[in-house]
Amino acid sequence: MSAIEAEHSPRIHYGWVIVAAGYLVGLLTSGLLSYTRGIFLVPMAAELGSSRLELSVGFTISGIVAAVTAPTAGWLLDRYPVPRLMALMSVWTALGYFAIAAIDGRIGLFVVMGLFFGLATLHLGGPAPAKLVVDWFHRQRGLALSLLSMGASTAGVVTPPIATALIESFTWRWTFVIYGLVTLVVVVPLILLTLRSAPPRSTTPAGANSALSPANADPVERVWRRSEYLASSTFWGIVVIFGVMGCVFAGVSLHLFAHMTDIGIDPIRASFVLSLMAGLALASKPAFGALVDRLDARVSVMVSLIAQTAGMGLLLIADDYSGLVVAAAAFGFGYGGMVPLRNALTVIGFGTRSFGEVSGAMRTAMAPLSMGGMPLAGWIFDAYGSYAAAFTAFAALYLVAIAAVWLLRFAPVANR
């Protein structure tokens, strides 16, 4: 069935095609680098003569640039066709992979991560695909967002062993070249051929972006002024909660592989721990999506935070492979809710018409928290030769995030 036929079929709502295509884009873009950058850390440090802190700063720069440009990106997402922006940024990402393969020092890394990946992140792995989904769906939006975010987690399951094997066989530079070729040859055509902006609301199949009468319209479905959302406790609750989640996830994703090999775990076995962690995140995403559709959104957030806190505590005391497996499983289950819950909570609190702008403002506000995880862990390791203090700090941050849940203010599920 063609894309046009699917769009008009009474049995297939095109929103689900958007979800499937967005899943693949997430797998091959944001998920690809996020879940394998830690595997590049040790060989890159050895060849470039850089410390882990310096490389951590390099990878963090992309997040800083993304945070600074997020309000502008959000404004663009609310006003211009999202698929075109995503296609453009896919080409930009491919060029970034080719550029990083040619760097000869940490300064080159800083420039490439900021100029290429910092600008592309928001349009590929952040609000852009989520913006498409929230526009296509009204009911079952949490489920749709969770399925969308499973693409990145699938990358976390399958790519660590593949990246490890590629680096060992072809070096880290040629592995980045392969990443770039995949982006150009697969991702760009996928976006151009399948993704499209949602039509105006009309009567559509169950779960789709169905028509809403004034009597049952979402009370937050309006354009929010900047002064309004910045004055909302819900805005700042989401910023703190997901800023902490982003901070810890970034630190763990970059440094866990190095931590495991430091304590004597074979690289291939260590890569399978990363895959297990991502696998549990993959499995938990639909559960969190269904949960946020049916219960108070704060319940879903608490479940996610408690699981992540338990995982960090277990990681702190794990000193063998079995302990690392258990810790990774608990942590992975919890952080599986990070992306779908953040997007769902933003829509629940602020609606779809301001989703891009509010999401962009949140990313900027989160930056002081979310950008600190990678360099903090790198600095602690360089100073003390261990990640123990970093993992302790991460566990403490989760307690702050749990307290921030009480800042969230949402309408009851029946009223949404």
Image (cartoon, rainbow, N blue to C red):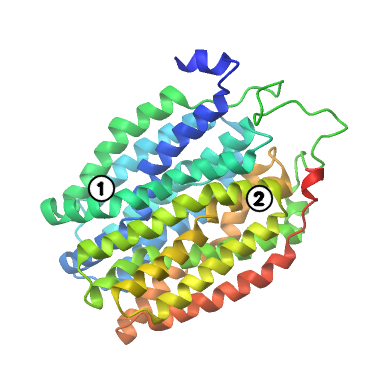
Q: Which residue occupies 47% across, 29% down?
A: 84
* Left or right of 93, for residue 363: right
Height in image: 310 above or below 62?
Answer: below
Q: Amino acid at mark 1?
A: Ala
Q: Residue at x 69, y 65 (%)?
A: 405
Q: Is residue 192 visible?
A: yes
Position in image of residue 256 (x %, y %):
34, 69
- Residue 160's place in the image compared with 56, above or below, is above
Crowd around label 2: few <14 · some 14–19 · many ≥20 (10 Å): many
Between 317 and 387, the residue placed more toward the observer is: 317
| 73 relative to 259 in the view: left or right | right
Q: Is residue 189 above or below residue 331?
A: above
Residue 120 in view, yes or no: no
Q: Secondary structure at mark 1?
A: helix
Earlier sequence position, callout 1 versus callout 2: 1
Outermost residue, right side? 215
Residue drawn where x is 21% and y is 76% of the image: 264
Write down the quadrant of residue 384 in the picture: bottom left
Residue behind mark 2: 292
Q: Residue 406: image x %, image y %? A: 73, 67
Image quadrant assignment for residue 354? top right
Q: Dividing the image into 4 quarters, which one contains the N terminus?
A: top left
**Rendered residue at 40%/55% (across/down):** 278
The residue carrying mark 1 is 99
SS for tag 2? helix
- Three-letter code for the amino acid on which mark 2 is drawn: Val
